[in-house]
Every structure is written in structure tokens, then in C-alpha cells.
Image: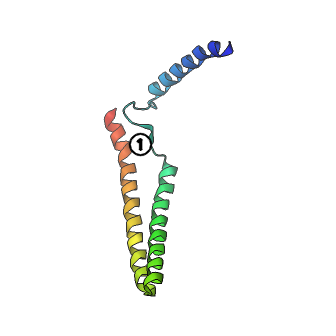
Amino acid sequence: MADDDEAPRFKDFDARLRRMRNDAGLGRSESEPESRRPSVGGAGVQVGIELVAGVIGGGLIGYALDRWLGTWPICFLVMFFLGAAAGMLNAYRHIRRWSEMPEERSQDR
């Protein structure tokens, strides 16, 4: 069986790779879950999505309310700016959470 022969080699390779990462200071903290480590590119995309989604969501809700109530620009403008504010708040929270990550890692070492 080929699978039985290859398994010890992969385990040995994984152990050597883990040891080399730890020696280089690139090892992962066992207490830190994988989902808490965002990449820089991923964080930027997430911030952009938060901003755009807030503006579009608020605008659509305001437009729907205006169509339903017959008050064209009032609800649209109010909900547009509320959506923009909510998007900025969510983006700020995401950036703040992301920027605190390196400080937490440096305190663990």
C-alpha cells in the first residue's frame, strides 16, 4: 500500500516545516484561531465593501420608502446619509480591529 509508506514522510515534513517556521519567528500561535488573521489585501477589500454596502443599502431603502410614501427626496437623502455613516462606522471598526492585531502578537512573544 503506497498510502502507508507516504504518511510518515508527510508527517516528518510537516514537523520539520513547523520547526523551521518557529525558528524563523513565523510560527503560528496555537491560541490564535486562523480566522483572526486577516491579510492586508483582504482587510482593504473588506473595508471597501463595508463602505459601499452601507451607501447602497441606505440609498435603496430610502428610495423604496420614498416610492411607497410618495415623498421623493426626503427618505432617500436621510437613509443615504445614515447608510454612509453606518458604512463608515463598520469600516472604522474593521480597521481598528485589524490594526490592533500586530500589537497583540508582539505582546505574546
Q: How many marks?
A: 1
State the image coordinates of residue 46 (x, y, percent, origin top left): 48, 55
Closer-to-camera residue (99/94): 94
Screen quadrant of the C terminus: top left
Alpha-carbon neighbours of circle 1 within 10 Å: few (<14), some, or many (≥20)? Answer: few
Closer-to-camera residue (31/75): 75
State the image coordinates of residue 20 (x, y, percent, origin top left): 50, 24
Q: Residue furthest right?
A: 2
**In the displayed structure image, the side of residue 11 where residue 94 appears, left or right:** left
Closer-to-camera residue (86/41): 86
Q: Under tag 1, what secondary structure? A: helix
Screen quadrant of the N terminus: top right
Above or below: residue 26 compared with residue 42? above
Which amino acid, by three-letter code, is at mark 1?
Arg
Check disc 1 and report the residue beneath it: 36
User: Which residue: 37% across, 44% down?
Assistant: 101
User: Which residue: 48% across, 73% down?
Assistant: 60
Quadrant in the rendering for residue 27 = top left
User: Which residue: 55% across, 18% down?
Assistant: 11
Q: Residue furthest front?
A: 68
State the image coordinates of residue 28 (x, y, percent, origin top left): 43, 32
User: Which residue: 38% across, 69% down?
Assistant: 85
State the image coordinates of residue 37 (x, y, percent, origin top left): 44, 42
